[in-house]
Image (cartoon, grey):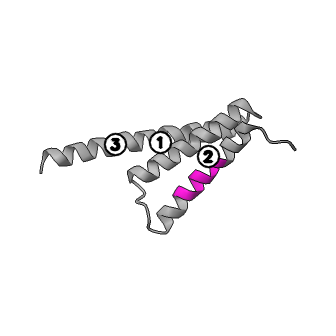
Amino acid sequence: MTLQWFDYVGFFGAALIVLAYFLVQAGRLRGDGYGNQVLNALGALGVIVSLVLGTFNWPAFVLELAWLLISLYGIAWGARRRRRSRMFR
């Protein structure tokens, strides 16, 4: 099996998702925190790149797309929440 650059991007993306999960479980990141959401979004994007440029798999693509969209929603929701809390200080 010969790995291409996009395979490494996919492995790195999967590692970011697992790292985010571990850091939340270890109490190093908040589940609703910006760092967790960014790690998940970048990880999902990496896996999507590897799927689109490599061997495509619909179920994995749909899962990672959902993961990315939920992470982006979390980033936007958190930014809105932080902006509101600054207004009421």
Read off the residue under disc 1.
70
Magenta stretch contains residue 19 = yes
Q: Residue lying at the far front in this picture: please name it.
A: 5
Which mark lies nearer to you, 1 or 2? 2
Local crowd at mark 1 within 10 Å, few (<14), some, or many (≥20)? some
Q: Secondary structure at mark 3?
A: helix
CB atoms of marks 3 and 2 within 8 Å: no
Distance in Å between CA atoms under marks 1 and 2 = 16 Å
Read off the residue under disc 2.
13
Read off the residue under disc 3.
77
Q: Secondary structure at mark 2?
A: helix
Highlighted magenta segment, given as a residue range:
12-20
What amino acid type is highlighted by mark number 3? Trp
Q: Residue lying at the far left in this picture: please name it.
A: 89
In the image, residue 38 lies at what x, y percent?
A: 46, 46
* Residue under the point 85% across and 42% down: 2
In the image, residue 81 lies at what x, y percent?
A: 27, 46
Local crowd at mark 3 within 10 Å, few (<14), some, or many (≥20)? some
Magenta stretch contains residue 1 = no
What amino acid type is highlighted by mark number 1? Ile
Q: Residue lying at the far bottom in this picture: please name it.
A: 26
What amino acid type is highlighted by mark number 2? Gly
Local crowd at mark 2 within 10 Å, few (<14), some, or many (≥20)? many
